[in-house]
Image: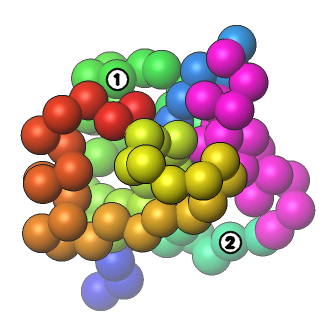
């Protein structure tokens, strides 16, 4: 059985750099072909309306701008236990 994978770009494109997840998702869809089990979605600012899209997803990659006290444009990877700790305060 193949794991369903969702690449989800989040953010508000009206706030320019805050929309980085949406811009990345769009670039991925335009520039690459993915196998059927991979879906690339521009989630924008839909929030909880995206929950139905998570049904059956085995792996989820979120792309969003977050405030972590690092330099502008720096990439951060939050995995496992790092995610709940980082989300205790609003960082996006």
Q: Residue 28: x and y, percent?
A: 75, 58
- The local secondary structure at tag 1 comes to helix
Work out whether residue 8 can be spotted: no
Instruction: Give SS at disc 2.
Output: loop
- Using a 10 Å C-alpha cutoff, classify the residue at mark 2 as few (fewer than 14 neighbours), some (14 to 19) or many (20 or more): few
Q: Is residue 89 above or below residue 58?
A: above
C-alpha distance separating marks 1 and 2: 25 Å
- Residue matched to label 1: 47
Residue most toward the right?
A: 31
Which range is magenta? 15-32
Which quarter of the figure is the C terminus placed in?
top left
Q: Is residue 57 above or below residue 91?
A: below
Instruction: Please state which of residues 2 and 15 is positioned toward the viewer in this rendering.
Output: 15
Locate residue 27, reporting x and y percent: 81, 52
Q: Is residue 39 left or right of residue 88?
A: right
Please identify the quarter of the rendering in which residue 80 is found: bottom left
On the rendered structure, is 69 left or right of 57? right
Q: Residues within 10 Å of mark 1 (few under 14, many from 20)?
A: few
The reply, left or right, for residue 46 in relation to residue 21 is left
Q: Where, quadrant-wise, is the N terminus in this rendering? A: bottom left
Q: Colour scheme of this structure image?
A: rainbow
At which x and y percent is residue 82? 20, 65
The residue under the point 12% across, 53% down is 84
Observer-nearest of 60 and 88: 88
Q: Position of residue 16 (x, y in %)?
A: 73, 24
Residue 2 in view:
yes
Asked if the residues shown at circle 1 and circle 2 are in contact, with their CB atoms under 8 angstroms apart, the answer is no
Give the mark, 1 or 2, whose residue is nearer the N terminus. Answer: 2
- The residue that label 2 is drawn on is 34
| Residue at figure coordinates x 45%, y 42% from the top left | 66
**Between 90 and 1, which is closer to the camera in this rendering?**
90
């Amino acid at each position: 059985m193949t794991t369903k994978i969702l690449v989800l770009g989040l953010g508000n494109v009206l706030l320019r750099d805050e929309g980085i997840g949406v811009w990345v998702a769009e670039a991925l869809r335009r520039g690459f072909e993915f196998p059927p089990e991979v879906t690339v979605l521009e989630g924008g600012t839909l929030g909880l309306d995206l929950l139905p899209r998570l049904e059956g997803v085995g792996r989820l990659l979120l792309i969003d701008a977050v405030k972590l006290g690092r330099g502008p444009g720096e990439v951060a990877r939050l995995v496992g236990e790092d995610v709940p700790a980082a989300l205790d305060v609003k960082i996006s």
